[in-house]
């Protein structure tokens, strides 16, 4: 064999002096083979370092691969990395492997990844949907029994299992916390697009808290930014208003990071901040960051348990599982607004 070419079944057959069909029978335990021939084939496999192509075999015989496909929007977002870790920890004991792909928050790439995972006949499919995707095309797979679970955001156009955070309730609690400390003008820094499920739910929680406190909604206090830099710019626009907010609610982890950066650059230590989703090193910021913490590892584990139950034969109706959030008080959300100046 020349160079670093991977050994094939033909190479094993040539080494032993038998046909490739005989090697296949030995490796797949499919048909009678003499004990001495079986031993020689296995010795050649070890000698050459041959690895069977399980994907090709599964496609040939119609079997499922011992793998679960997970599609996430962004590899660089630590939230989704922790979700994937939760999934992997839960499926490892069952001998299943996790395969992860990123849609880059685009529907076309998401569909391409779905097609790739289906072509290799994964045992289950887990999807964090991109902002503009829809999932009617998966109805046939679901009817055929393929376990499909959506994480963080539900499916569009498909009735399927989903595991999502208590987004609206968590946002309501975070904004109510700022109101309890005396804030009446609270800025909202959210994700894009505005139609994104998590963004809609968290914005509604923001509106809920204002309504319950009898505070007016001011559209000028709502800004958006999909990444850290855009969120920092959005924060600066809020701070530049003629009547700026005294507190900010950052509606995801990247918005929180951008808001922290903007406040630091502006040397503003008087603006209260609550973020949705925890951050690494949140406790060492000055002041430490108060957050509405999600449980991404728990979300991944819950989704994996749903998949495993479906693989074990559960054919009950699709269900949505809500993962609770919790308010983590650290200091940034407990700043009271400075007294407004009175007349001369």
Image: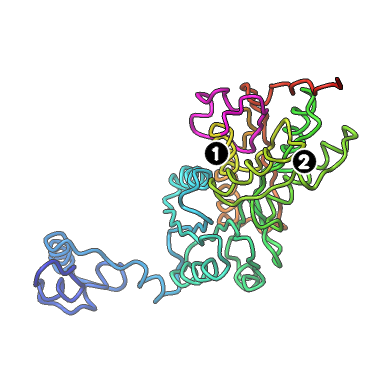
On the rendered structure, is 185 left or right of 234?
right
- Compared with 210, 162 (above or below) is below
- Determine the residue positioned at 42% across, 54% down: 97
**In the rendered view of the protein, which quadrant contains the N terminus?**
bottom left
As drawn, the residue found furthest toward the front would be 344
Residue 130 in the image, given as x and y percentages of width and height: 59, 60
Residue 104 in the image, given as x and y percentages of width and height: 51, 60
Instruction: Report the magenta stretch's main SS.
Output: loop
**Which residue is at the front of the view, 64 or 128?**
128
On the rendered structure, is 65 left or right of 255?
left
**In the rendered view of the protein, which quadrant contains the C terminus?**
top right
Q: Is residue 297 magenta?
A: no
**Which residue is at the front of the view, 60 or 32?**
60
Q: Which residue is mark 1?
A: 257
Q: Which residue is mark 2?
A: 206
Question: Do the residues bearing badges 2 and 1 touch, measured as CB atoms within 8 Å?
Answer: no
**Which residue is at the front of the view, 10 or 180?**
180
Q: Which residues are magenta?
A: 266-289
Disc number placed over residue 152 in the picture, else none? none
- Compared with 251, 314 (above or below) is below
- What is the secondary structure assignment of the residue under circle 1? helix
- What is the secondary structure assignment of the residue under circle 2? helix
Earlier residue among tags 2 and 1: 2
Q: Is residue 280 magenta?
A: yes
């Amino acid at each position: 064999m020349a160079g670093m070419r991977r050994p094939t079944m033909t190479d094993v057959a040539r080494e032993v002096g038998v046909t490739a069909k005989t090697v296949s029978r030995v490796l797949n335990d499919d048909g009678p083979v003499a004990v001495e021939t079986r031993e020689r084939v296995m010795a050649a496999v070890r000698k050459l370092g041959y690895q069977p192509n399980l994907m090709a075999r599964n496609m040939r015989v119609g079997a499922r691969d011992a793998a679960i496909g997970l599609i996430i929007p962004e590899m660089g977002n630590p939230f989704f990395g922790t979700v994937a870790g939760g999934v992997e920890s839960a499926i490892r004991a069952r001998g299943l492997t996790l395969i992860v792909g990123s849609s880059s928050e685009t529907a076309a790439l998401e569909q391409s990844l779905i097609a790739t995972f289906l072509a290799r006949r994964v045992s289950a499919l887990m999807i964090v949907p991109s902002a503009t995707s829809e999932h009617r095309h998966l109805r046939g797979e679901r009817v055929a029994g393929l376990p499909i679970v959506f994480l963080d955001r539900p499916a569009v156009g498909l009735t399927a299992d989903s595991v999502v955070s208590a987004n609206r309730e968590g946002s309501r609690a975070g904004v109510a916390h700022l109101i309890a400390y005396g804030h009446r003008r609270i800025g909202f820094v959210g994700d894009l697009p505005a139609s994104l499920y998590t963004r809609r739910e968290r914005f509604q929680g923001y509106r809920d808290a204002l309504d319950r406190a009898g505070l007016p909604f001011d559209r000028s206090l709502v800004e958006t930014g999909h990444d850290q830099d855009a969120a920092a710019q959005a924060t600066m626009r809020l701070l530049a208003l003629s009547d700026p907010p005294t507190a900010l609610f950052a509606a995801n982890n990247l918005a929180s990071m951008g808001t922290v950066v903007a406040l630091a650059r502006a040397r503003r230590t008087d603006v209260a901040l609550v973020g949705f989703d925890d951050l690494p090193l949140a406790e060492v910021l000055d002041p430490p960051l108060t957050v509405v913490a999600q449980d991404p590892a728990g979300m991944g584990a819950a989704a994996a348990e749903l998949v495993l139950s479906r693989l074990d034969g559960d054919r009950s109706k699709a269900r949505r599982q809500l993962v609770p959030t919790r308010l983590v008080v650290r200091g940034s959300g407990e700043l009271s607004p400075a007294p407004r100046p009175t007349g001369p």
